[in-house]
Image (tube, rainbow, N blue to C red):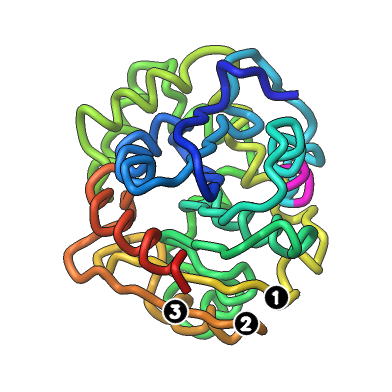
Amino acid sequence: MVGTADVLDRGSGPAFVCLHGFPQNMSAWDQVADHLVAAGFRVIAPNMRGYRSASELGPRQDYTSTKLAEDVLAILSELEVSEAAVVGHDLGASVAWEVARIAPKQVTRIFSLAAPHPAAFVQACLSSAQLLRAWYVLGAQSTALALKLFSPRDAGSARRLVTFLSERGLVSPEVDRYLDYLRSDHRFESALRWYQAMPLNDPRSVWTKAEVPATVIWGKQDPFTNGRSVDLTCQWTNSTCSVHRLPDAGHWLLDYNAKPVSEILIEDMKH
C-alpha cells in the first residue's frame, strides 16, 4: 500500500483524486489543490506506482493501466472515500479512464487533461499526425536506449532530457525539480515502465466507452497531443462530455495554467 508520505490529502468535501503523468509527481498538483481546497473540495493526489519514495522497479506487466487503476482504488478504499471525481494529466489520464472503466459507480466524473481517451489517441495516430508527436513512446520501449539518451543521472543525457522537455514547454525551475526527484531510487526506470507496459494493456482499457460524465481540457499549443485526438474523445463516452480548449496553453497545464484548469474542474463538478 502507498504510504502517507506518498499521498497528498488536503481539504474536505467532495473529493478529487488527481493522477500525475511523466515526468512529474504528486507535487505537480500543489497549485490546483490550493484552488480546489479553497473552493471546498478534498484533493487526493498520490505518487503513482514507479514514482514513490521507495525503490520499486518491477516487471513491465506490473505497470499496465489496470494495475495502476487498482492502486488508485486501493488508496480510495484505505481513505474510506466511496466516490470521487478522477482527474488525470498526461499518462495519468489513461489511468483515470481505466478507473472509470473498472469502477464506474465510484467515479462521479472523469477529467482528462492534455490527453484524449485511449481509443481516440489510437484513432488519431492512424488518421493524423498524432503518431509523429508520440515518437518518444517507441523510444521508451528500450530501457537501455532511454537511459543512454535521457537518463537524469548522467550529465550529458540529463542535458538532452532537459532540452527535450524545455523545448516542449516545461522549463526551469519546474523541469529541474521533477528531474531531481527522478534521479534516485530507480524512479526514472520505473517511470519508463508505464510506456513499456502499453503493449500489455487489456484491449478493453483502450476500446471501452466511458459510462461516466467526462471533461477534456487541452491546450492548443500542446506539442504532444493534437486536436484530432481531442475531437474524437467524446465519441468514446456514453454520458455527457465537454471539451475545453485553452488557446494559449501547452501541455503542462498543472504548472502554468492551474487557475483556469481549476475553474473548469470546479464548474464542471456542478453538472
Q: Residue at 76% x, 38% y: name it.
A: 77
Q: Mark 1 points at which residue?
A: 211
Q: Measure the C-alpha gap from mark 3 to mark 2.
A: 10 Å
Viewer-proximal residue, 61 or 213?
Answer: 213
Can residue 164 be seen in the rendering of this structure? no
Q: Do the residues labelled 3 and 2 touch (CB within 8 Å)?
A: no
Q: Name the residue under label 3.
A: 242
Whole-percent x and y of residue 53? Answer: 58, 15
Q: In this view, does 17 lie to the left or right of 49?
A: left
Whole-percent x and y of residue 215? Answer: 47, 70
Give the magenta-colored segment's residue range: 66-70
Q: Measure the C-alpha gap from mark 2 to mark 1.
A: 6 Å
Secondary structure under tag 1 reads loop
Amino acid under disc 1: Glu
Q: Name the residue under label 2.
A: 239
Amino acid under disc 2: Ser
Q: Residue at 59% x, 37% y: name it.
A: 192
Q: Measure the C-alpha gap from mark 1 to mark 3.
A: 14 Å
Whole-percent x and y of residue 157? Answer: 39, 26
First reached walking from the N terminus: tag 1 or tag 3 = 1
| Label 1 neighbour load within 10 Å: few <14, some 14-19, many 20+ | some
